Amino acid sequence: MPETYDLLLRGARVLDPSQGLDDTVDVAVHNGCIAAVGRDLQGEARQLIDLAGRLLTPGWIDIHSHIYAGATTWGVHADAVCLATGVTTIVDAGSPGWANLPGFIDYVATVYRTRVLTFVHVSGIGLTHGPIGECEDIRYADPERTAAAIECWRDVCVGVKVRQGGFQVGDNGVEPLRRALQAGRYTNTPVMVHIAIGVPLDDVLSEMRTGDIVTHCYQGSGDGILGLDGDIEPAARQARARGVLFDVGHGGGSFRFDVARGALARDFPSDVISTDLHAHNIDGPVFSLAETASKLLNLGVSLEEVVHQCTSAPAAAIGRPELGTLALGAVADIAAFDVREGGHFEFRDVAGDVLVGERRIEPTLTVRAGTVYRPEELAAEREEAVQRARRMRAFTGRNFAALGWSPPDL
Ligand SMILES: [Zn+2]
């Protein structure tokens, strides 16, 4: 008696680091879940898609983004961007703080077709308005209220966020981080820490626990993981030895090819790849997780490791090991790509440096809980998200001017 499936994906190279699987096999989906993985699966399928020559992986997980659109200056409408580029789970990195999390639940998390999760900012205002450091006034940083918010919406909240650059914390040093860690201890969740110039790296990393996440690991603004001598800071190696994770968090100002190259040459790869997608980089230099992953690929990270850092590694980092896998019975979150070889592809970092590479990971198909999405079907929606981001940038620019900042071109 042949099986009946909703969807049969035939003939791709299937790479699933969660199961050590790398083989040319078929993947069958039924009732929104992975029903079978194997060679030449027999059976009837309502929808059959030939993926010969393509790469098929578990759906990608982007653990650093900003998608609280309308409520924060960084927020973008990223649903179409995700579903056009293989991302089936997107995690906001602390746009909502403990005070405005309920709006994020109502207007983002429950509206997207992409699975939405979030880190909750220890500052109640979250990342409301770019020009104001959210922990300059330490009264906003409240571990008890942060923990309470996480407990109330545990299905969406995966941890705590804090930004530890001088601009964000003012004169408060690592006190915001200490409060974030307290919230992490209350809820037994990881703390994601943005590192940036203005607070010594040693002071930040020495506080962090096993499973906490450094984001912007390849930033080059100062107080980063590469010392002035070009070597990896001892504090970074010590933190890694303790089990602190290092996340790319590309962003608009936090990923430089020279830093990534230096770190990789000194055997300091990232643990997780993420975009830090927001209104100031959705139309470059970030674009998508696949574009960010392609940069790491062309810097010498293997395709297998890149896929690991976009699937099972982020799933483990956010305490959701049931995601990022094609295990039987798992939710059918799947990504398919055309991995192009021997081309001439140009990539840009936040400093405008250009990397010319031969390989590029191009998304061709996304399956979210059994539903198939193709990039071409989402092109118009994606373009609208870019236009909305540009409008938000213009608005934010006007506010910068009012505060005496020089505005960008309006
Ligand atoms: Zn961010």
Image (cartoon, grey):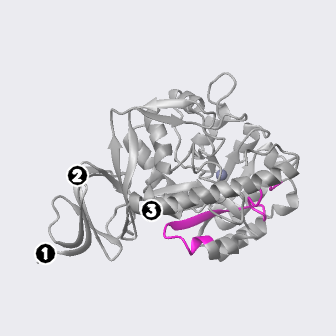
Q: Are marks 3 and 1 in contact (CB under 8 Å)?
A: no
Q: Which residues are magenta?
A: 108-135
**Ligand 1 contact, mark 2 (Cβ < 8 Å):** no
Kindly identify the residue that appears in the image at 61 percent across and 40 percent down: 217
Rendered view: 222 above or below 206: above
Residue identifier under label 1: 2
Q: Nearer the viewer, residue 44 or 38?
A: 44
Residue 253, image x and y in percent? 66, 41
Dot 2 and dot 3 residues touching (CB under 8 Å): no
Residue 38 locus on image (x, y percent): 21, 60
Q: Earlier in the sequence, mark 2 or mark 1?
A: 1
Q: Amino acid at mark 1?
A: Pro
Q: Which residue is mark 2?
A: 52
Secondary-structure class at tag 3: helix
Q: Is residue 36 magenta?
A: no
Rounded to the nearest angstrom, the CA distance separating label 3 from label 1 is 34 Å
Secondary structure category for the residue under label 1? loop
Identify the image quadrant of residue 152.
bottom right
Q: Are marks 2 and 1 in contact (CB under 8 Å)?
A: no
Q: Nearer the viewer, mark 2 or mark 3?
A: 3
